Image: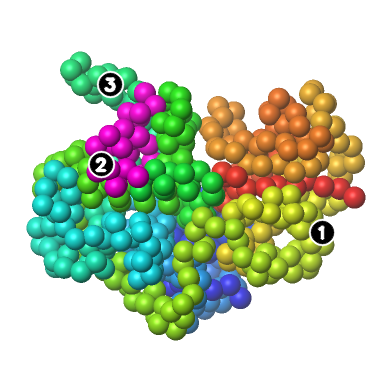
Amino acid sequence: MKTISIIPSFGDKGQHVEAVQIKLTELGYSLGNIDGAYGNQTKNAISSFREAHNLDGNGQLDAAVLKLLGLTVEKQLSDDPFVAIPSLVDRTGISKTRWENGNRGQAPYGFYYGMGLLYANLYEGLKKEDRVAQEVAKPLGDKRDKDALLRFKELISKETANELGTAEDRLRGLFVMLFGLGLMESNGKHCCGWDRGKLKGWGDPTKIKVPTAENSEAGLFQTSYDILEAVSASGRKLMLEIFKKYQLSQDGTIALFAKGAQCSLQDAENYGEGEGKVFQYLSKTSPAFSVEFTAVGLRSAARHWNPIINVGDHEDGLQIKKGCDDLLKDIQAYVDHYLDAEPQNMWVLPKLGTTQSDPLKQQALALAGEIGQKDQLQALFDFDSKSKANYWAIVDYNKPRTEKRLFIFDLQNKEVKSYMVSHAKNSGDLYATEFSNEIGSNKSCLGIFKTGKTYISDKNGRSLYLDGLQETNSNTRERYIVLHPGEYVTDKNAGRSLGCFVVSPVYIKEVIDHLQGGSYLLAWRS
């Protein structure tokens, strides 16, 4: 029986709601979309489910209904921070927080998941003398125009009673600021791109700004590459090290940040050439990079961000929320518990930006063996043994289109999920039996693919680019083979495409959120 953090209530947002939505959808109760938000559609589906089981159709969840859905509330937090920290977020209800300044409303719930996990990462690093953690938690400077933490000292003290006296207090205070900055700059969306309103100066010709590689802001905090001109020499050196580190690794937190966030094709555009353009792309595809890079910058280049300049201004200044401070204290206590038990082991840090450990891969292979996909998953692991991907996908074309045959393995959560997926119309009817790499063949192709970025198609909506990495699928881009949603894929039958991997619109967000940005997919048939 699958566990969830708490029993969801109307208005909740989070993985606990998402788990209920998935179960209801699997049982045939229409929701329109699995979005992790407990709104009227979810309430109506719960009402129908309750009535079908001779219960009052009030649209509410309780322990009895959860049991009927095959769900139960966890008794204690997991020892895996990727699982436990989202649970802590769900328990606090912080995802329902409204941010008044700038009329920002509510952030995507994944914003709290990702920020919480990265706080745990740096908090552990601080305990173990990690250079980035020490830099962002260093004693306060003496210039308000340089050190954002000094600039916000009074407001942080007023709202959270944190006097920033210790390194732990300063790290927590800085992350409370980062929560507010993320809301003001991007509404908590990791994928946010340059603000095109600047092209027209928001109606003021004196404020018109043309985007370049260096001045184009990107990511959660709308940081731009030219901040390196404003920071101290030591800060610049460390920020460049962070920049290089994340170019060489895949950020495992993006799947969390993506929950509840909608990314547009406009956001995906990057400007200019060179390192500044790479910076924009990395800022939007690696939230961990964006957090570390910006955190260091905040301690020596405070005036880079308008919400920092406008401290205390009701309209434009970022907000300090006590609820964020309370959440971070809960995360501190959680991390301390495990550090006390195993003080010599690196606990959170190895899970971020490093190769997945063999035990996780072995557990995934065991799951793959249970469904006849072990050799195929091993082939993916061997293809890129240095990959930091958490999600790995297999499409088994030995199965008919009336069965689930897209399998996604989640290493951190030690689980595999299956989905209906199409094959091409010229590959066969019930079974795909003919395959081709030729342009215009309208046949599926086999081999290993690597996922790219997402984009918005006028015809199909949010879609995911794929790159074919073998001779059997080398024309993937030229054939416009992507992963996209299609109404003709249902829970009982997957229609046929022109070669694309098509998934039901009900599950497409979950599938794309998991696989985007460098995961691998193997399509095979014996």
Q: How far apart, in angstroms, are the residues tagged by discs 1 and 2?
A: 50 Å
Three-letter amino acid code at the position of disc 3:
Lys
From the top left corner, tell me how far across and down residue 32 is, in percent.
Answer: 54, 48
| Residue that badge 1 annotates | 375
Residue at left offset 78%, top offset 68%: 370
Tell me whether circle 3 and circle 1 mark residues in contact (CB < 8 Å): no
Taking the spot 89% from the left edge, 37% from the top edge, the residue there is 434
Q: CA distance from mark 2 to mark 3?
A: 22 Å
Dominant secondary structure (helix, strand or loop) of the stretch shown in magenta: loop
In the rendered picture of this protein, how many numbered marks are placed on residues?
3
Label 1 crowd bin: few (<14), some (14–19), many (20+), radius 10 Å = few
* Residue position marked by numbered label 3 in the rendering: 209
Identify the amino acid type marked 1. Asp
Please check the rendered image and state whether residue 313 is part of the magenta-colored stretch, yes or no. no
Which one is nearer the viewer's eye here, 511 or 318? Answer: 318
**Residue 225 in magenta?**
yes
Magenta residues, start to end: 212-237
Q: Is residue 370 left or right of residue 431?
A: left
